[in-house]
Image: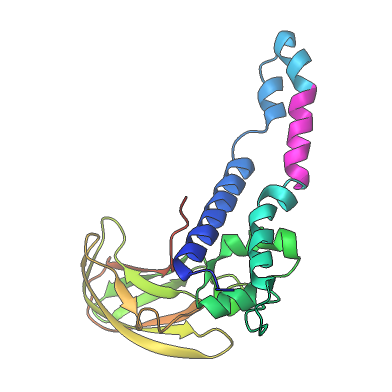
Amino acid sequence: MADIDKASLDLITDRVAYIWGALLSAITGGTSFYDTVTATEDPDVELPLGQPAYDQDQSVDDGAWRAHLLDRIVNGLLAHGALESDTKADVYASLSALLTAVATRVHADFNLAQYQVTAAYITAALVYDEVKEMGLFSVTGSGTGTFADGLALSALTGGNNLEAYIPADKTATNVVLDVTCRIPGAATEVKRITVNGDEFTAPVAIGTPDTNIYTDITAVAIVSGGVNGERVGFRSIEDRVPAL
């Protein structure tokens, strides 16, 4: 049998990631149904809606629905990978094996969704994280400044491309920075970048896109440039943005 093509596999996994992430955001935010009903202090509202609202909140909180939310499509991908050719060359015992064969990666939210079915996480190197703010460098004068550490990427992912950008209403005047980045694993390496412009200036890639991927920024040191009050932010880049 032929492996699913990369474009089709990416569309499927991106949609799963979008649905998973969007739904979890929706159910973990806002006011509970029960609190909304009881806040009316109206018996005509509370008597018919109180118990259903409470039951629904409990159903959402226990998370049992997650195990079956996207199980059919995940199981379909597993079945596709398990189909045997005459030579058995196309047998993939896991989604990690299938992703490796197709030469693609999946979003962290797809990884969480498929875990409900497989009870195993995809090999970290095959997973990229959502966009995370990884730190902020504040210039205090020409050639001086401080770095406030931000978020690291999930340990379940194999790293993302990173970029430096100028926050809204800020500028950067030829700010040269040495950015210490953690390679997947324990090692780090330093990438030198120059940031110059304002919030509308295109972000600066840290390293070579699609080649240098990192899981964290551990330190930032200014080499030269900058004016007191200027800022440079750092964030991760998704391989692909989850989409319907």
Q: Residue 139, position in %: x, y? A: 30, 72
Residue depicted at x 61% and y 48%: 24
Query: Residue farthest to the top?
Result: 44
Q: Kindly report the secondary structure that dominates the magenta region of the rendered protein.
A: helix
Residue depicted at x 26% and y 69%: 228
- When the figure is inspected, residue 14 is found, relative to residue 213, above or below; the finding is above
- When the figure is inspected, residue 7 is found, relative to residue 174, above or below; the finding is above
Q: Residue 31, position in %: x, y? A: 63, 33
Front-most of 68 and 81? 81
Residue depicted at x 65% and y 60%: 76
Q: Residue 50, position in %: x, y? A: 76, 21
Q: Quadrant of residue 7?
A: bottom left
Can residue 158 be seen here? The reply is no
Asked which colour scheme the image uses, the reply is rainbow
Residue depicted at x 52% and y 76%: 102
Which quadrant is the N terminus positioned in?
A: bottom right
Q: Which residues are magenta?
A: 51-63
Q: Quadrant of residue 89?
A: bottom right
Q: Residue 207, position in %: x, y? A: 36, 83
Q: How many marks?
A: 0
Front-most of 97 and 3? 3
Residue 17 in magenta stretch: no
132 displayed left or right of 200: right
190 displayed left or right of 67: left
Front-most of 241 and 44? 241
Residue 56 in magenta stretch: yes
Can residue 7 be seen here? The reply is yes
Query: Residue farthest to the front?
Result: 86
